Image: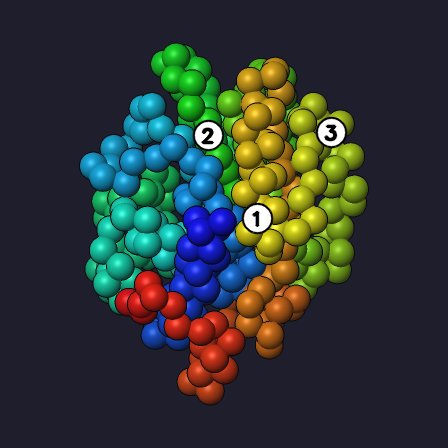
Amino acid sequence: MAELQNLKQLCTQVRRDIMRMVFNVQSGHPGGSLGCTEYFVALYGAIMKHKPAPFKMEGRGQDLFFLSNGHISPVWYSVLARTGYFPVKELHTFRKLNSRLQGHPATHEGLPGIRIASGSLGQGISVAIGAALAKRLDGDKRTVYALTGDGELQEGQCWEAIMFAAHNKVDNLVVTVDWNGQQIDGSNDEVLSLGDLPAKWKAFGWDVIKLDAGNDLESVINTLKRAKRRTGKGRPVVVLMRTEMGYGVDFMQGTHKWHGKSPNQEQLDSALKQLPETTLGDF
């Protein structure tokens, strides 16, 4: 119980980090970052076997994570820093010239925790499949995790990859879809309806798990543990995770309008009042 409370406190701190990072440079993507906070905290704090230091790209003997919707880098950077990959104070450099914390994650700056450049939407599932197959060839029994946005599934490459993974029984892979129903120009239904997602993934041969409470930390942890237990059974696993874009900040919740918009000073002050200071301390 104490561990869960600590992780909940981390969720609050991560949300404070997101808001301050985006405000500091008046640039970035707060909506999806806030909505996926519980997922990242659960993954790095309770699910994955990972080693922050020394960081090694190949990650042998470790679980690996790949972020496909790279624009939500603020939440990932905060969680990486807060779990020991690089100094928390480096969050000050987000999106600044010559920073390792680019707007979309990149590898040439050598930021620990980042294994691919991402943000060209639709590619993350393919990369995760490749990493999972490499682990199979190496006899490495660890699991590969990936996160993709629901709007990304409008990309044809995603469905080619989804079909490939099932055909090749890539069963050391857990893909999570951030199913918030929003994308940059509006709701998914307005832009290009995704239809019956559970039925589609099932038809493509995946083991489908629905998570309706993607902003409840305990539910996310329990669901990811369940997904892990279902690996190694001949099918890749997908978690369809219902979240609310902008969760935790009332004026950002449930709307696409904060997909890539930064708050002004008054809005930042309002958000931070809703996210009380933690013992972890701001960067």
Q: Quadrant of the C terminus?
A: bottom left
Image check: 196 left or right of 179?
Answer: right
Q: Residues within 10 Å of mark 2 (few under 14, many from 20)?
A: many
Residue 188 percent location from the top left of the image: 70, 55
Front residue of 79 and 197: 79
N-terminal label among 3 and 2: 2
In the rendered view, tell whether residue 42 sits above or below residue 180.
above
Q: Quadrant of residue 215?
A: bottom right
Question: Which residue: 27% across, 48% down?
Answer: 84
Residue 88 percent location from the top left of the image: 26, 59
Front residue of 268 and 28: 268
Q: Which residue is mark 1?
A: 218
Q: Quadrant of residue 235?
A: top right
Helix, strand or loop status at disc 1? helix
N-terminal label among 1 and 3: 3
In this view of the protein, can residue 174 be seen by the observer? yes
Given contact means CB atoms under 8 Å apart, are the residues at marks 3 and 2 in contact? no
Distance Cα–Cα, label 1 vs label 2: 21 Å
In this view of the protein, can residue 41 be seen by the observer? no
Question: Which residue: 34% across, 74% down?
Answer: 24
Residue 85 percent location from the top left of the image: 27, 47
Q: Which mark is residue 144?
A: 2
Q: Residues within 10 Å of mark 3 (few under 14, many from 20)?
A: some
Q: Which residue is mark 3?
A: 202
Image check: 81 left or right of 13?
Answer: left
In the rendered view, tell whether residue 219 sits above or below residue 96.
above
